[in-house]
Image (cartoon, rainbow, N blue to C red):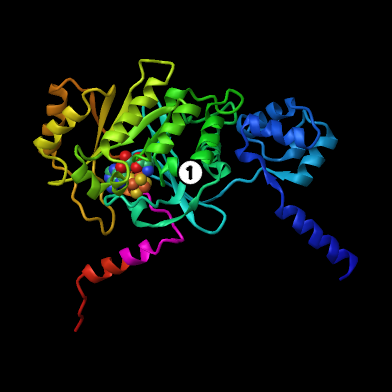
Amino acid sequence: MSQESLETVVHQQAQKAKINLLGFSTSRLYDFFDGIGEKRFRATQIIKWIHQEGQCDFSKMTNLSKDLRSKLADIAEIKLPEVVSCQDSIDGTRKWLIRVDGGSCIEMVYIPERERGTLCVSSQIGCALDCSFCATGKQGFNRDLTAAEIIGQLWIAADSFDQFTPKAKRRVSNVVMMGMGEPLMNFDNVVDAMSIMLEDNAYGLSKRRVTLSTSGVVPQLDKLADVSDVSLAISLHAPNDELRNQLVPINRKYPLAQFIASAQNYIEKMPDNRRKVTVEYTLMDQINDRSIHARELAVLLKDLPCKINLIPFNSFPGSDYKTVTKTALSRFRDILMAEGYTVTVRTTRGDDIAAACGQLAGEVNDRTKRQARYKKRLDETQPINIIG
Ligand code: SAH
Ligand code: SF4
């Protein structure tokens, strides 16, 4: 091999091995700078450059010495996932399709409201938990997202609104971990990414404005209580184990009583005793929308400080369920309100671009073969088109 091509190979190897600093919280950056013999205050400088200035090029980080800039460029990088497409709904909702390493794509949604702008972030490529009413679940599962891929979604949204400049058009004021995937199944990366969301030197979001939603991975929720105090949403969808076992299969492992006790423990550990859990309940016609279900839910939640968010089911190609009728929705809400609960109904946003809750599917290179089975079933149930 010639000297020149050897150098190219060495250079390529070095490129491959570069450490991506995008997903590093301050404490991980401390370790990184300790490891390369640099002062710890560099961590604060770098995190501000990346997440407050939106700067991903070391050579432009003007408060670092030239030597440090080139040393960093040799060993590290700030690498974002690739935006494949970005669609705007007529109601202002924006949806991105984002390609991550390995070729799969995830989806992310921004929902503007008068007082706030909420970004719905994905935590996994697909989801292994297979809830029967969820498009992500039907896609199967590929892998966990890295902390860089999770916080990279917030960076991309912030950049698209010029949030890193004084002429910001809009802002991401809230983040909900309600995109593709079950955040507690990707615990460490989600905790790291959320800590960057909260960090003053990065996005500085208040813990009330960052919400983790889970379908009930109880041991991980118990663990979360020790390391984080972001807001919590729990996806119940049924008031008893029999029905929930069918809709949310993880319930067979961690039944309702355990899940609710764990959520209770989570909010009790929080310093601010005014905080409440948000209970998410997706309403499906004739499945979980009867008066008896509402009354049972009122009893189930009687000791849990909570507010209830009712979500009319959003359909997707091949989904098995129908959405709740207006009458059943009002009846369900009124029963809970009469029992003293605070109840909100989630309005469907971004329906025209398939950006509503539970519709995110991305492009998952499925490793579970679930997607193939699902597609086969879909094909079999479709009428055969006999022409001529
Ligand atoms: N895995 C987590 C977070 C992602 S799902 C969880 O399950 O909580 C975010 C929310 O969307 C959950 O409450 C989920 O139950 C709800 N959802 C899923 N599919 C839906 C659908 N088709 N229509 C309405 N809501 C849905
Ligand atoms: Fe996974 Fe949540 Fe969808 Fe269930 S509802 S399959 S846990 S993303």
**16 sits left or right of 219 in the view:** right
Residue tagged by mark 1? 186
Q: Quadrant of the N terminus?
A: bottom right
Magenta segment, principal secondary structure?
A: loop
Does the stretch in magenta take in 166? no
Residue lying at the far bottom of the rendered structure: 388
Q: Quadrant of residue 215?
A: top left
Element class at badge 1: helix
At 35% from the left and 32% from the top, the residue drawn is 233
Residue 155, percent from left and from top? 55, 38
The amino acid type, in three-letter code, at marker 1 is Asn
Within-10-Å neighbours for mark 1: few <14, some 14–19, many 20+: some
Q: Is residue 177 visible?
A: no
Residue bounds of the magenta highlight: 360-374
Q: Quadrant of residue 384?
A: bottom left
Query: Where does the image place residue 143, in percent across and percent down from the top left?
Result: 49, 53
Residue at point 30% right, 69% down? 376
The image shows residue 260 at horizontal and vertical percentages of 29, 31
Q: Quadrant of the C terminus?
A: bottom left
